[in-house]
Amino acid sequence: MKNDVWESKYFDAYDKILLNSDIYLVVRDFHVNSMRNCHIVLDSGCGTGNVTLELLKKGHIVYAVDNSKKALDILRKKCAKHSKQLHIHNIDAKKLPFDDEMFDGVTSMFVVYYMDDPKAYLREHYRVLKYDGVLALTGRVSSENMEKVLKSYEGSLRKRNLLSKLQSEFSIFSEKFLSGVKKAVISGYTFEQMRDMLENIGFTNIEEYPNPYFGQCYSLIAYK
Ligand SMILES: C[S@@+](CC[C@H](N)C(=O)[O-])C[C@H]1O[C@@H](n2cnc3c(N)ncnc32)[C@H](O)[C@@H]1O
């Protein structure tokens, strides 16, 4: 079932907070850099398009997929300059309207743990990936201690002298983060459990990469 948080005020504040957060930017850049050898990229659960925009700036063709209309409205405005390279799909990412082996790369950042059937979601992404294509995935182990993440976001705003200016956005973001977003996490896995799942689907050369979310999240690269 779709969680209402993705159509809520959460996304009004999302970019102001996260594009000023050190830990979020590290993960975003990992996803963008992982796609460096890919021409056609799927950004699955693209949200407001922070990975999409950076990929577009680098000349990639991007298919941006999300089931939140609100997030995609923000993405569309943000990426307007690059519309010729961009395809936007307001769909459930568990069933993709794309041919087999269509993409050189798939990026899925902070999305897989919102899936009630993460294996079905990942199998579908394996299907649309070319042979030798790359998957960059950031997942979550559990929704415990998300307050620590919030503290880090707050610290980044303070460091940039933005905390008082963005106080109301930070309140909205925090409230939604600890209520809706935290509750939306329904399938946490450790890196090892996720590696086993991906191997079972057929992915190979699965490697973990550093992730700054206090052991709550992991990032990995896998190949078809
Ligand atoms: C935490 S946000 C991450 C957005 C973006 N990847 C980023 O890192 O900034 C999670 C996103 O997953 C999307 N999402 C959740 N379930 C989905 C589904 N079944 N199909 C497509 N998108 C989904 C939400 O709408 C939301 O935009």
Image: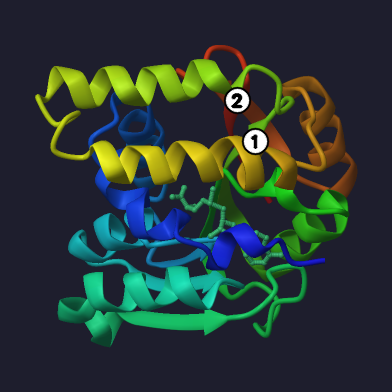
In the rendered view, would you say 124 is above or below 34? below
Question: Which secondary structure, mark 2?
Answer: strand
Q: Residue furthest left?
A: 161
According to the image, label 1 marks what residue? 139
Q: Which residue is nearer to you in this view: 68 or 133?
A: 68
Decide if residue 9 is in sight here. Answer: yes
Q: Residue at x 15, y 17 (%)?
A: 159
Q: Is residue 190 left or right of residue 4?
A: right
Q: Amino acid at mark 2?
A: Tyr
Question: x, y percentage for residue 140?
Answer: 67, 31
**Ligand 1: which quarter?**
bottom right
Question: Which secondary structure, mark 1?
Answer: strand
Q: State if disc 2 and disc 1 touch (CB < 8 Å).
A: yes
Q: Which residue is nearer to you in this view: 9 or 48?
A: 9
Question: x, y percentage for residue 93?
Answer: 68, 69
Which quarter of the image is occupied by the N terminus?
bottom right
Q: Is residue 69 left or right of residue 154?
A: right
In the rendered view, would you say 151 is above or below 143? above
Q: Residue at x 15, y 79 (%)?
A: 81
Label annotation for residue 65: none
Label annotation for residue 218: 2
Question: x, y percentage for residue 57?
Answer: 19, 62
Q: Residue at x 28, y 25 (%)?
A: 22
